[in-house]
Image: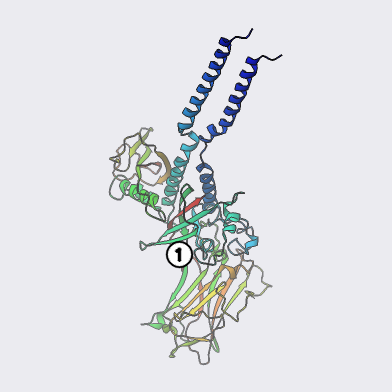
Amino acid sequence: MLSLDFLAGFTIFMLALIMVVSMVPGLLAGLQSSGIDYDAVAYRTGVILVEDPGWPAYPQFEQPWELVDKDKIQRMGLAVSKDTPNVLLSTKVERFFQNSTKENPFFTPEDYRKFVIFGDIPYSYNFSLNISHPDGTYGLKQAGDPLPPGYGYIRRVVKIKEPGVAVIVGNTTSPSESPYWTSSPTMPTQNFTVRLNFSQLLNQSINTAYRIDPRTEPVNVTITNFEAYLNDTSGATLKSVTFRKWDPTRPGIGPAPIPFSYGKDDTDYYTLCIDGKPEFYSPEPNAQVSSNISLVLKPAATSLFPLDQNSILDIKFNFDHDPPETNITGTHLYDYVNVTRTDLKTAVLEVAIW
Amino acid sequence: MVNNAGQLYTMEGVAAGLIMLLTAYIVVSTTSIYTTGDTHIPDMQLEQLGSDVLAMMDTPDIDGGTSELVGFVKKGTGIGGGNDLQDEFLANCKMRSGDPDDNLRAQVYLSYRTLGGSVNTTLLSSPDPWFTGRENTVRVTRWVQLSQQPGDMPGDMRTDPQAVLVEVLLWRA
């Protein structure tokens, strides 16, 4: 038979035990830090963005993630290549932040979570990239929500690689001294070609941070002071600009045109500007040129071809008039000598996660 | 045989136990313990930042060019040397999208092998007047290949091509 003492003591003991057990989680709660997880996710996201080129990537796939449809993207990284951590490719950066502060951003919050933040929890985020320009100004790109208190954070200092540009400058004071000027232009068509020889461009001895790779970066060709090439006329008719790829190691196969519509302007693939006018022209402009031509062939267009280190891509400017309206002729090599490469720009990438 | 004294002793013991438990709970829950798991995070962030800045300063802006870091180290402690390295390093560290992160401070050291074969470490930048030695600093390093002895360096430094170690102490004031 139980004594009254034992019953009272045991009851009080049990009550105390229940109280203590219920206090234990509260005791441990004081030791855990809510910031740890966010900092770790921010660090991981920063590493993916800064040290990884993303997936799909060159050369394993024909098109890197910034050129493929969203449903084919596995991971968004901004590095030029896995061998060049902290050196970011401007085309990847542009895609990553495309319209990010506008009403219709290219990537939705769900895309950012799926392709770069990862994790089961739907984290909120803020990415910002502040690029320092040589003139002392800064260019800020941002994506995400305003920062609340208590977010995880990482800051990475990076360099941005931007595409080079080939500029052909006519000599207006002494036209005959202009490059690619001829006193006897061909009839009835006059052609000027810009040649991209991939065996030179993809030279493995050149670090990927400085390499000209038209498969991932735009090709910029600008002809200025075109007045120097005019044959006693006020302008020359640019009939067409054609893009042809061929492979000198396979002599039986002739040049093939890039398979996109030549009939309309498509700024995703190329932009053609004439005389600094604001509108874009199609590659068959049939327009008068009097002062300059600016062509940007974007990676989305060049990646339509399987281009390798044996390929040659010719960009042909075709002027068609009889008698000839222009004295420009010849082939300009788009290579490490003729292309003005842009210096790497310092920037800071900040990732905040909460 | 049950008596009142025994009951009182039991209840007194239980009450004392409860009071002790309650006291222990209050003490533990009101004391903030800064665990080692937390301290490494700001250190890691600062170390990553410093490491990035040194790596980027050691990346030439043009193909085949000389990196900023090598340019500074070549000048030693002279004009365009250690102090400018310190300023440029801090300018890069402080850069962010909003206001600059102004409370960062740094000191630059250079380790090299002497003529006698031992390793010597010298201050490359001017000493920071606020540095007490008790700051929670992080240390970031970068090897630099030199073709000649930097300017204004101690006489015991070798003159032939050599690798030297640039060390930066970075802390939050």
Vertically, is A301 above or below B62? Answer: below
Chain name for mark 1: A
Q: Residue furthest top?
A: B1
- Residue B114 appears in the figure: no
- Residue at screen point 50% across, 28% down: B25
Above or below, A89 relative to A246: above
In what element is the residue under mark 1? loop
Q: How many marks?
A: 1
Judge left or right: residue B148 versus residue A279. Answer: left
Residue A128 image position (x, y, % from top left): 47, 57
Question: Percent x, y for residue A340?
Answer: 44, 67
Left or right, A239 with reference to A180: right
* A56 and A115: which is toward the camera: A115
Which residue occupies the foreground of this view, B41 or A248?
Answer: B41
- Hey, what amino acid is under mark 1? Arg
Taking the spot 60% from the left edge, 22% from the top edge, the residue there is A12
Q: Image height check: is A234 above or below A293?
A: below
Give the residue at mark 1.
A341
Q: Quadrant of residue A55?
A: bottom right
Q: Position of residue B127 (x, y in %)?
A: 29, 40
Is A194 in front, or is A141? Answer: A141
Residue B42 seen from this side:
yes
Q: Residue A325's spot in the image, x, y percent?
A: 48, 89
Which quadrant does the N terminus of chain A fall into?
Answer: top right
Vertical placement of residue A96 versus B86, above or below: below
